[in-house]
Amino acid sequence: MAEPMRLQKWLAQAGLCSRREAERWIDSGRVAVNGQIITQPGSLVAHGDRVVVDGRVVAAKKRNSSIVLAFNKPPDILCTRHDPEGRKTIYDFLGDFPERLLYVGRLDINSEGLILFTNDGDLVHRLTHPSARVPRSYRVRVHGRINEATLNHLRRGVVLEDGPTGPLEVTVDRDTAANNWLTMTLYEGRNRIIRRIFDTLDMKVSRLIRTSYGQVSLGDLARGHWRFLSMGEHKQLLKDAQPVDRPSLPPPAKKPPLVHRR
């Protein structure tokens, strides 16, 4: 770590948790730096500082040690680490994986398809932050007929109770008398957003499959199975997940070329 870093970001990069969870740990007094309990999430950590969580020393993650897995979530499986009712969760499919992994891209219990796992909490933050606009694509089966007017309405965007969606990318893959199969691409991950979009049209989503997250595709990965990302996929994912701590500045304006007059 060449420069001091915010404590919540340091904890996320160490693979312990997401930044949001790290902020909760700090607020509740669970984190100490150099023997002093820290309660301000913006506090800085420098190289050589001793960070302790719940009485245990935390080692900084070595550079280039992030791991990312692709997992094909079956339906009726929960996106959580533990369920008080004892229902099966996505973590049950990882077995005794040696690293503590966080998931990227929550799916509700009835939905299925691609979820990413990583040991890099900072990467989770960057991939899921709204400003990153990482695309997520889905195959959606909807009961009822969808005409061109409905498609145009969806493409312009839909207003939900927690704000407008912005323009949506929607194509019809298969159209029958009973239902339609659509492909949709979104650039945000609000809770049950696709189901709520079709609720505004009084239409029911009967199946929802995420097929890609960024440039990572589900492909032929079988339900309930996971795989490591290829080196190319990993590099592209890191490229897609641009830092979101500060707004990106526009590139400097190009100076007009000099014109030599005779």
Image (cartoon, helix red, strand yellow):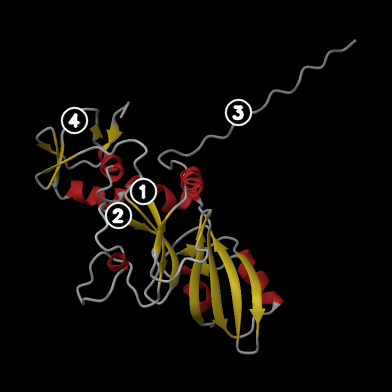
Q: Which sits earlier in the primary sequence, circle 2 or circle 4?
A: 4
What type is the residue that disc 4 sits on? Asp
Does residue 68 appear left or right of residue 194 in this picture?
A: left
On the image, numbered disc 2 is attached to which residue? Answer: 101
Q: Mark 3 belongs to which amino acid?
A: Pro
Q: Which residue is mark 3?
A: 252
Q: Position of residue 86 (x, y in %)?
A: 21, 76
Of callouts 3 and 2, the N-terminal one: 2
- Location of residue 36 by image quarter: top left
SS at mark 4 in the image: loop
Q: Which mark is residue 158?
A: none
- The circle on residue 67 is 1
Q: Which residue is mark 4?
A: 49
Tell me which label, 3 or 1, sits earlier in the chain. Answer: 1
Residue 70 sits above or below residue 253 on the image? below
> On the picture, is 83 further left or further right than 104?
left
Are dots 2 and 4 in contact, CB under 8 Å? Answer: no
